[in-house]
Image (cartoon, rainbow, N blue to C red):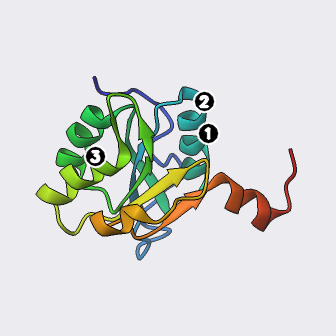
Amino acid sequence: MRPQFGWVAKQDYNETQMPNLKLIRILSVEDHPIFREGLGMIIGSQPDMLLVAQAGNAVEAIYEFRPHRPDVTLMDLRLPGSNGTNTLIAIRGEFPRARIIMLNTSDSDGEDKAVGVHRYWSSQQYVSQNGLEF
């Protein structure tokens, strides 16, 4: 199932005004609809980023990665039916140069480094770096 969203295209992007701007093409893989929508809104508000597709599970992630070949994939570590690590292995098996940032609600113990995880971005890191409290 291909997700539908209207804010993907940069409405204000004009090649004549910004001819050298190369948009960072992003695939977002997140099973929680509210968080997925929030990521989409944040990415959509950035002048140098373009959300090319979204996925809510591992199967959709692989399905969307193939035709879009994003520059960066933001992927939740925990996905229904599989997990982000297995999905990363599947994508990188087919596309070894894929760049995937794993999103996690807690700190990782580092065991996923063996499968090619370059970076985790936990909600705790964001909160502490931005001085936010809940």
Give the number of the disc on residue 87: 3
Which residue in the rendered view is the most extreme toward the bottom?
20
Instruction: Give SS at disc 1.
Output: helix
Three-letter amino acid code at the position of disc 2 = Ile
Instruction: Tell whether label 3 touches label 1 (CB within 8 Å).
Output: no
Report how many numbered discs are placed on residues in the image.
3
Three-letter amino acid code at the position of disc 3 = Thr
Asked if residue 54 lies left or right of residue 95, the reply is right
Residue marked by disc 1: 38
Q: Would you call the spot at circle 1 few (<14 residues within 10 Å), some (14-19), or many (20 or more)?
A: few
Q: Would you call the spot at circle 3 few (<14 residues within 10 Å), some (14-19), or many (20 or more)?
A: some
Instruction: Give SS at disc 3.
Output: helix
Residue 58 pos. (x, y %): 30, 37
Give the number of the disc on residue 34: 2
Residue 33 pos. (x, y %): 54, 27
Q: Nearer the viewer, residue 116 or 8?
A: 116
In the picture, residue 54 is in which quadrant? Answer: top left
Which residue in the rendered view is the most extreme toward the top?
1
Q: Earlier in the sequence, mark 2 or mark 3?
A: 2
Residue 118 pos. (x, y %): 40, 70
